């Protein structure tokens, strides 16, 4: 059994069963800090408005209110399961089950990326974007399944939008033996030749 830690989830990998169990983190202390300290920092006459904002603001993610810290792991688990069920895209590592977002059961990855972080940069080269999502920059969020790329962490809505737009390209054109350093060297040579 292995464990892994993410920003919003804690993962237990059970290789014998071929599953990974993703437990949602509930950050009570961060939530209470946001709920109680943020209004105190407000200027006089705005404390009640700030408290109402923390309690009732409908934008879950943009302002990182106290609900964000309490429920983001749960929300990501629910989003991951729903997105897999709706799309069944081959780039997604299957999410088999979600218990109300408190934990998910996903197929465990067996084969990490060969070139680690360099393999992740292939995503940006193939789709010609640089969005800075940590998901696409972290090799721990990917694995190889039958020599094809699979993504393990896709609960964030922005990641899902990117996968809907570019998932097919990345899945079809991903080369597990791609060498980022060789790519950079070749790009530098081509750039120098154009000058």
Image (cartoon, rainbow, N blue to C red):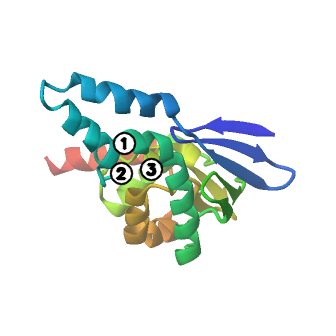
**Mark 3–mark 1 CB contact (< 8 Å):** no
Residue 111 visible, this orientation: no
Q: Residue at x 42, y 44 (%)?
A: 67
Q: Which residue is drawn at 34% across and 41% down?
A: 65
Q: Gap in Å between the C-alphas at discs 3 and 1?
A: 22 Å
Residue for badge 2 = 60
**Among the two numbered marks 3 and 1 on one chain, the one whose residue lies closer to the N terminus:** 3
Residue for badge 3 = 136
Give the side of residue 135 with respect to residue 47, left or right: right
Q: Gap in Å between the C-alphas at discs 2 and 3?
A: 23 Å
Give the side of residue 85 with respect to residue 123, left or right: right
Q: Which residue is drawn at 51% across and 35% down?
A: 27
**Among the two numbered marks 1 and 2 on one chain, the one whose residue lies closer to the N terminus:** 2
Q: Gap in Å between the C-alphas at discs 1 and 2?
A: 43 Å
**Residue 181, picture quadrant:** top left
Residue 27 visible, this orientation: yes
Q: Which residue is drawn at 47% across and 47% down?
A: 72
**Mark 2–mark 3 CB contact (< 8 Å):** no
- Specify few, some or many for label 3: CA neighbours under 10 Å numbering under 14, 14-19, or 20 or more: many
Give percent across and percent down for residue 147.
Answer: 66, 62
Give the side of residue 36 with respect to residue 45, left or right: right
Give percent across and percent down for residue 142.
Answer: 57, 52
């Amino acid at each position: 059994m292995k464990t892994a830690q993410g920003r919003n989830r804690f993962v237990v990998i059970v290789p014998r069963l071929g599953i990974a169990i993703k437990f949602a983190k509930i950050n009570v202390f961060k939530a209470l800090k946001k709920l109680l300290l943020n209004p105190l920092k407000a200027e006089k006459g705005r404390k009640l408005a700030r408290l109402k904002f923390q309690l009732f603001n409908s934008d879950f993610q943009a302002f990182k209110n106290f609900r964000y810290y309490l429920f983001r792991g749960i929300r990501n688990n629910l989003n991951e399961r729903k997105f897999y069920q709706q799309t069944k895209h081959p780039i997604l590592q299957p999410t088999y089950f979600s218990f109300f977002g408190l934990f998910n059961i996903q197929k465990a990855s067996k084969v990490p990326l060969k070139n680690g972080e360099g393999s992740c940069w292939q995503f940006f080269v193939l789709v010609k974007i640089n969005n800075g999502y940590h998901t696409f920059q972290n090799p721990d969020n990917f694995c190889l399944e039958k020599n094809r790329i699979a993504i393990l962490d896709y609960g964030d809505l922005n990641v899902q939008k990117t996968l809907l737009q570019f998932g097919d390209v990345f899945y079809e054109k991903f080369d597990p033996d791609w060498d980022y350093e060789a790519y950079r060297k070749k790009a530098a040579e081509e750039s120098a030749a154009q000058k």
